[in-house]
Amino acid sequence: MNDNLIQETVRRLLANEVSRELLTAVEDGAFASDLWSTMANAGMTKILCREEHGGIEASWLDALPLFFQVGYTQAPVPLAQAVVGQYFASRYGLDLPGESVFSLAAGLQTHGLSVALNTAGEPTTLTGQIKAVKWARHAHWLLAELNDRLVLVDIKGTGVHIEHGVDAASLPADTLVLQHAPVARALPVLIEDLPKPLQVTYAAVTAVQLTGALEYALDLAVQYAKDRVQFGKPIGKNQAIQQQLAALAGEVACSYAAATTALRDLPAISQNHAPQAEFSAAVAKVTASDAVKAGASIAHQVHGAIGFTYEYPLNFATRRLWAWRAEAGSSTEWAEWLGQAFVRGGSEQFWSHLTARTLPPGARQPTHQTAGQHINTERLVVHV
């Protein structure tokens, strides 16, 4: 399956299935179960997985059209989370149903969790709160990143309570309250040069979604500038409007370039080496998030008041842009992390590693046990 076929398949599917009625229904609390089943049956959730697990072992760049079209159409489904979750499950030998819904938690989201360990040092239960977990109320699995482990938790199982919440797009962003929630499986991080693979991949795919939604806002703004007539001519004939649209197009192009590079640098299912992934994902998330800040403003300036109304499609796009901008780490968090990494690396290594899209040796901070963690030296009932 080549990327053109993937792109055309997902584009046609989402163009046919994503309607104003579906968007509104999901924002009112429904789940797009028919659309989700169709996408899962088409193999989209398992595109990166091993062949024996139902995948085609595609590269992350091959999967770019999936994330981009979800952003462009604002499809109200957790496809990015499922692709990431299935990738890690398959990478470590798990064959989970294609319709499984995943929620992801990494970075600051998991700080403060208390992790009980068995005598072998493996996590067995989680206790604490994880806020702003997207799609948790509909999910089957939580995939969380804790120090040097990825842990899989059955969200429908014991010890998990869900407090409903929404993000800026009125989509599910719940709080998970964990009380000795059993860890179904602990997955070791075995990718060289990528100690935080979930955080990095989550940021990269979110950057692609942001790019897709931003391009949709650009297309809407261009069409509106052609159609809206004022003082006897389309407003797009005015040089000031043309300059704004050119600036918006530039933001989309920069975001697309950064997001594409980030996906190219992520490791495929059979690769265990990713020296450029952290740097590229951080740059992509910062670039896409900053593009949203400038681009959404331009799109609304071109549209005027109509762009803010719930009835107009730009409203849906920009609300998702703001929601995804805060997802998988904000631009401030990633920019600070990247800056501190190069400061720790020293000035002599700055230029060579910047141009190579890699972090200087010793740039990463040592992995410390998260505050509030404790070790339970008893062998627990749940084995991981």
Image (cartoon, rainbow, N blue to C red):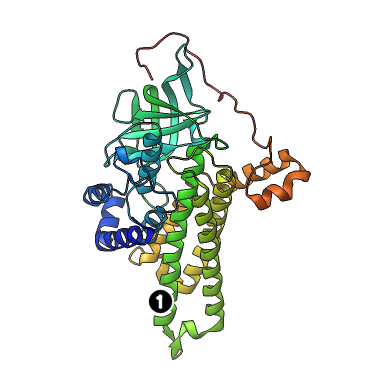
- The residue lying toward the viewer, choosing from 109 and 279, is 279
Q: Quadrant of residue 275?
A: top right
Q: Residue at x 42, y 23 (%)?
A: 126
Single out the residue that lies furthest toward the left. Answer: 34
Q: Residues within 10 Å of mark 1 (few under 14, many from 20)?
A: few
User: Which quadrant holds the N terminus?
Assistant: bottom left
Q: Secondary structure at mark 1?
A: helix
Q: Residue at x 47, y 46 (%)?
A: 327
User: Which quadrant holds the C terminus?
Assistant: top left
Single out the residue that lies furthest toward the top. Answer: 378
Query: Can you identify the residue that label 1 sits on?
Result: 223
Q: Is residue 347 shown left or right of residue 71?
A: right
Report x, y in % for residue 370: 55, 25
Q: Quadrant of residue 158?
A: top left
Q: Residue at x 29, y 39 (%)?
A: 100
Report x, y in % for residue 120: 47, 14
Q: Residue at x 51, y 74 (%)?
A: 245
Whether residue 271 can be seen here? yes
- The residue lying toward the viewer, choosing from 116 and 4, is 4
Report x, y in % for residue 217: 43, 66
Three-letter code, disc 1: Gln
Whether residue 316 can be seen here? no
Residue 221 to residue 141: above or below: below
Single out the residue that lies furthest toward the bottom. Answer: 232
Report x, y in % for residue 155: 32, 31
Residue 365 to residue 242: above or below: above
Q: Quadrant of residue 225?
A: bottom left
